[in-house]
Amino acid sequence: MPDAVVIGAGPNGLVAANLLADAGWSVEVLEEQPEPGGAVRHDSGVDADFVSDVFSSFYPLAAASPVLAGLGLTEHGLRWSHAPHVLAHPLSDGTCAVLDRRVDTTAASLEVFAPGDGAAWRRLYEVWESLRPDILDALFTPFPPIRATARLAARLRSAGGLRLARSLVLPVRRLGEEEFRGAGGRLLLAGNALHADLAPEAAGSGGFGWLMSMLGQTYGFPVPVGGSGALTDALVRRLRARGGTLRCGRRVSRVVVRDRRAVAVRTADGETVPARHAVLADVSVPDLYGGLVEPEHLPAQVLDDIERFQWDFATFKVDWALDGPVPWKAEEAARAGTVHLADGVDELTRFAAQIAMRQVPDRPFTLFGQMTTADPCRSPQGTESAWAYTHVPHDIRADAGEEGITGSWDAGEQELMADRVERQVERFAPGFRQLVRARRILAPPTLQSLDANLRGGAINGGTTALHQQLFFRPVPGAGRPETAVAGLFLASAGAHPGGGVHGAPGANAARAALRRHFPPGRTRLQRMLAGRDRTGTKR
């Protein structure tokens, strides 16, 4: 009998399993898909000579995460690579805002849009540098992060206090208008805010856009050498080296609860896998509450709150094998790993408004990835492995374009939407479509079929809006990984601090499980011995 069963071998599940194994627990990870990784996987499904990331690609939060740093994954084969520029946001007139790990380069890019904007960016960066250690500590530790918050509050007082706090809860449109005279800085902030489901007018989008921009400024948007799955491979190798077990193709259909405690899981084919101490669930919140856990084991309030749970936007993705580099109008975009495609903040607002009205956007804001630019081994020399994704509503009521897309996402509608995405790229890179050797379409239902946590193509485990963050995530009063069922812990992006590949939800769940069985007074040696039987053999 393993000490812990982990449901799901996404990055959070694998991080949790590794930390439990480090504490001497025997751990078994069960994964529904035929391979581990969740939304961190790559393949050669577009073209045999091209490596394509199936889901996520760029990992600023992983680079910043003390959780992943503490696992020493470079010792297990993980290597990182960077594009020359972190990010570019070109406009149709050929101008381009550039985010670069060298602050001088970023500032110079913004100075072209308006004198003084380079200095404005430096001021935002200086604030970040003064607060960065405590922000990251608060972000990656269990809620409430008491010590980090106390230190952060002290630093805020010396850095402007309430004025700075006001800036962080501003809509990103307003923050950009207050800080920058020209379009460049505003575009960087607003485009980064829309990495989540935060419209330019949403409260708190300013703080999120600033955070993502500063992460890129400091850590870049790195990629694993060889494909995103290299990160998964390192986590799996580390787990197995510590005695952990991973079984793929094993879908968990039920968490077995006895006397209000999780004691086992049952798979779809009828196998019961017992858990001596804990079950950790790297699954979506709606799939866990009232799904894997039968409703009679949950408080009525939790079931009611789950009915109000809000997903983030649905996602539509296209992968390409390109016969040459993308012919950007703005030369700076050719050196960026990530490129944001929207012709100004107003177009971003228009895009978000169409989604809010449940319309398929006619000019979709597109995040474009140039993977060979970021990691030259992704495709043959002189070519580019590329992708783009955009967002669409979950419940589509109308098409803002002319094709009449309804949201059935049959083969015809997928092709129509992929063409629309390509036309958006063409606005900023004329001749792009002539370079397409092959493409693959991943519509919302396809993404969900490849990873059940991506419900309807939602990639962040639930909305990033303020009403579902901190002690509201995943439901009010449930900001920690503990659940209403003893021994059951939420270890997915549905838990604080949310989406992104950083491992914090998994780490928080593992530490909560360990605290429950090993009070803080025990030494590390005592904890290790507790994970062994009387003969000294690891259980």
Image (cartoon, rainbow, N blue to C red):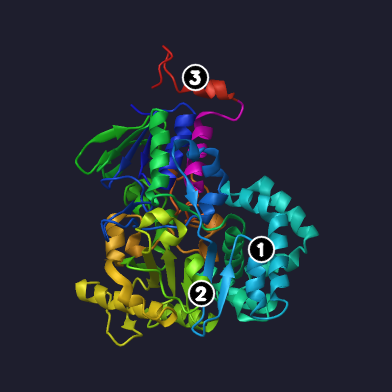
| Secondary structure under the numbered disc 2 in the rendered image | helix
Residue ID at (27%, 61%): 46
Amino acid type assigned to the residue bearing label 3 in the image: Leu
Q: Residue at label 1?
A: 103
Q: Kindly report the distance in space between the C-alpha atoms of the residues bearing marks 3 and 2.
A: 60 Å
The span from disc 2 to disc 1 (Cα, nearest Å) is 19 Å
Between marks 2 and 1 in the image, the one whose residue lies nearer the viewer: 2
Q: Which quarter of the rendering shows the C terminus? A: top left
**Where residue 125 sits in the image (x, y, percent)?**
69, 63
Against 163, is 30 above or below? Answer: above
* Region of the chain picked out in magenta, as a range: 503-521
* Residue 159 placement (x, y as % from top left): 77, 61
Indicate which disc residue 529 carries.
Answer: 3
Sequence-wise first label, 2 or 1: 1
The residue pinned by badge 2 equals 331
**Residue 356 at what x, y percent from top left?**
43, 78
Crowding near the residue tagged with mark 1, few <14, some 14–19, many ≥20 C-alpha atoms within 10 Å = some
Q: Amino acid at mark 2?
A: Glu
